[in-house]
Image: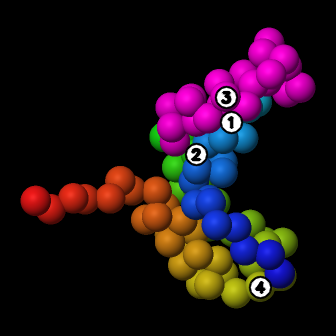
Amino acid sequence: MDVSTTPVAERIARVLAGQRISANAGGDAESASQLIDSAWADYLPDALAVLRTLREPDRAMAAAGDPAVWEAMILAGIKGARPRTVIL
């Protein structure tokens, strides 16, 4: 199984940004990668809302695996999206 090196909240935020910006997904920018790179953080609150919704699996998801593991994974993704605290 592949494991991404990009945090899940960032990946979701990039998809949401691309959906609104890229002409391939309903936006109007034909070359959107730089625009998405600069805008994805603006979509992080929406990405976190998606993750919070996913904390609780539906019946089909729960039947396919362990709901407690799923919730722990989603909570880790939410925690990973918090800004790092710098102590001076």
Q: Position of residue 20 (x, y in %)?
A: 72, 24
Quarter the C terminus occupies: bottom left
Q: Position of residue 12 (x, y in %)?
A: 66, 48
Residues rendered magenta in the picture: 21-44
**Relative depth, front residue between 51 and 84:** 84
Disc 2 on helix, strand or loop?
helix
On the image, numbered disc 2 is attached to which residue?
47
Label 3 vs 2, first from the N-terminus: 3
Residue drawn at point x = 46 percent, y = 64 percent: 80
Q: Is residue 37 left or right of residue 76?
A: right
Picture disc at residue 65: 4
- In the image, residue 64 sits, relative to residue 49, either above or below, namely below
Circle nearer the viewer, 4 or 3: 3
Label 1 vs 2, first from the N-terminus: 1
Q: What amino acid is found at the position of numbered circle 2 in the picture?
A: Ala
Q: Is residue 20 left or right of residue 39?
A: right
**Relative depth, front residue between 50 and 39:** 39
Residue drawn at point x = 84 percent, y = 72 percent: 60
Q: Is residue 82 left or right of residue 67?
A: left
Cα distance in 3D space between marks 1 and 2: 8 Å
> Would residue 49 be counted in the magenta stretch?
no
Cα distance in 3D space between marks 1 and 4: 27 Å
Disc 1 on helix, strand or loop?
helix
Q: Position of residue 78 (x, y in %)?
A: 49, 61
Disc 3 on helix, strand or loop?
helix
Label 2 vs 4, first from the N-terminus: 2
On the image, numbered disc 1 is attached to which residue?
16
Principal SS element in the magenta part?
A: helix
On the image, numbered disc 3 is attached to which residue?
34
User: How many numbered badges does the structure rendering display?
Assistant: 4
Give neighbour class at mark 2: few <14, some 14-19, many 20+ (Cα, 10 Å): many
Asked if residue 38 shows in the view, the reply is yes
